[in-house]
Every structure is written in C-alpha cells, then in structure tokens.
Image: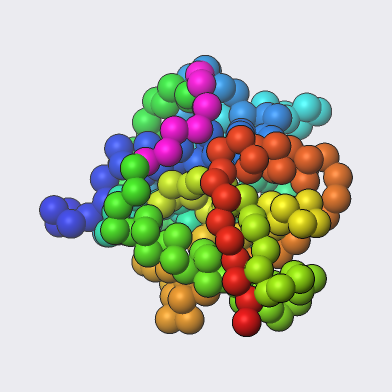
C-alpha cells in the first residue's frame, strides 16, 4: 500500500519532462521529440520510480530507441538521478539495458501518455533554503578546484560567471573570465537523497574540452549566469 510520503507516477513523469528540457537546452539533445506525444511505462517503488519509453526520441537510422530513467523523491521534489538511452535491437541482451528494463517491469507498471514540452526556454525556480545551500557548496567546490588543479589566478582571486540552476538539475556550469575556460559542476552524487554533495559537501568540477559543446555552454552560462568572485588562499 502506498504511503503519503511515496513518490507518485505523476511526479516522476513531471521530473522526466523537466529533465528532457534540461538535456535539450544544456546538452543540445537533437533527438527529443519536443511538442509530440509519447508513452512512458512507470513502476513506483516507494520514493523511487523507474521509467521506460520507446517513443520519446527519434534517432536517425535507429528503428527502436529506448530511454530509461530513475526518479527519486527528495525533500524539495522529484529528481531524475539516472538517464540512459539504448538502441534496443543492437543492444539486445546487453547487461545494462536488460537491467534497466527489468527493473521497470519487475512489478506492476502504469503506461502514461505524455505530452513532451514544446518550449524549453529555461525557467529558474526562486532561491530558497535548498538552493542557497547548493550555491554555497558550489562556490566551495569551485574554490577547491582552482586551488587544487586549476590555473592559479593572480592575486588569489578570479571572477567567474556561474549559470543559474534548479534544484533538480544534474549539473550546472561556470566560465572563468580570466581564461575563458568552461567548467562543468556535477550536482548529483552517490547519495541520491543529497543536494549538497553528500557527506563531503563537495561537487565534482571538471573542465569542458574545447569544441562545440564548450561554445554552447559558454554562451548559455553568460546568458543565464551571474558573476561571482572566487577567492583562493
């Protein structure tokens, strides 16, 4: 019997729709069928849901493409903690795909029609306690990255533009104004219930290699970000 504290299928589907928009905007996903109807099979297990869809993305020269999602209910709402995509016919029998599919169909599932978003222009939730705590950990993580492996700034201070984010984003981005370097900050950690990097209270920061992805992310970060001064002692 479901508890009032359990995740619902509707919450899981809405988290997936938000993740679709994130992937379209920030990852440049070219295959998602925005504005189209799709179907998602959902199995809810307490505060976790497993989702499987074979008509959400249209991948050229692939007859059957499947998307697998894991959604977890956190204190501030439902969050996608894992998304995988599979060429079903090519990868039939492959361990990861079969595992993801089986955990959806291991019990009672619901098939839910979904209208995929037509407009994915970013809309950012207002700052609240969770987001404020995430910002503090983000600043600490950027400071640690510059201190340990980044180019050390003159005078120990560097201005960065940090992209705005929502509490269900898998990652956000920053641009160093002295070097133009684009940094990726992973907001998901091994502890699926944590917004703030688990016990270590640190996010993983990594440079984005130069190329089309870095160009896209730099443009978006400068458009949707705000300047912060990072001090390294």
Specify whether residue 119 is painted magenta.
yes
Image position of 56 with respect to 49: above or below: above
Task: Reply above or below: 153 against 229.
Answer: below
Q: Position of residue 6 (x, y in %)?
A: 22, 55
Q: Residue at x 67, y 63 (%)?
A: 158
In this picture, residue 129 sits left or right of residue 28: left
- Which residue occupies the foreground of this view, 197 or 183? 183
In the image, 174 versus 81, the foreground residue is 174
Q: Position of residue 153 (x, y in %)?
A: 75, 70
Q: Nearer the viewer, residue 65 or 199?
A: 199
Residue 135 x, y percent position in the rendering:
45, 60
Quadrant housing residue 133? bottom left
The spot of residue 87 in percent (x, y) is 71, 42
Name the side, left or right, on which 158 lies relative to 179.
left
Q: Is residue 208 left or right of residue 139?
A: right
Asked where in the image residue 157 lies, by quadrant, the reply is bottom right
Residue extending farthest to the right is: 211
Residue 204 on the magenta span: no
> Magenta residues, as a range?
118-125
Residue 115 is at least partly visible in this image: yes
Looking at the image, residue 55 sits to the left or right of residue 110; the answer is right
Quadrant position of the C terminus in the picture = bottom right
Decide if residue 190 is in sight here.
no
Q: Residue at x 63, y 43 (%)?
A: 221
Taking the spot 68% from the left edge, 78% from the top edge, the residue there is 147
The kind of secondary structure the magenta stretch mainly shows is loop
């Amino acid at each position: 019997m479901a508890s009032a504290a359990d995740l619902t299928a509707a919450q899981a589907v809405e988290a997936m729709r938000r993740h679709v928009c994130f992937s379209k905007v920030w990852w440049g996903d070219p295959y998602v069928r925005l504005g189209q109807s799709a179907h998602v099979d959902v199995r809810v297990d307490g505060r976790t849901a497993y989702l499987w869809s074979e008509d959400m993305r249209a991948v050229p020269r692939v007859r059957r493409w499947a998307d697998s999602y894991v959604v977890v209910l956190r204190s501030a709402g439902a969050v996608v903690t894992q998304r995988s995509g599979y060429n079903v016919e090519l990868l039939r029998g492959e361990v990861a795909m079969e595992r993801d599919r089986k955990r959806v169909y291991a019990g009672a599932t619901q098939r839910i029609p979904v209208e995929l978003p037509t407009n994915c222009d970013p809309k950012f939730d207002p700052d609240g306690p969770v987001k404020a705590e995430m910002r503090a950990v983000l600043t600490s993580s950027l400071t640690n990255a510059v201190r340990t492996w980044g180019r050390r700034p003159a005078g120990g201070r560097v201005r960065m533009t940090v992209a705005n984010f929502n509490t269900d984003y898998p990652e956000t981005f920053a641009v160093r104004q002295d070097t133009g370097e684009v940094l990726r900050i992973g907001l998901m950690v091994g502890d699926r219930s944590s917004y703030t990097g688990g016990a270590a209270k640190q996010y993983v920061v990594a440079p984005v290699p130069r190329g089309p992805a870095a160009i896209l992310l730099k443009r978006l970060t400068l458009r949707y970000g705000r300047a912060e001064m990072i001090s390294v002692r």
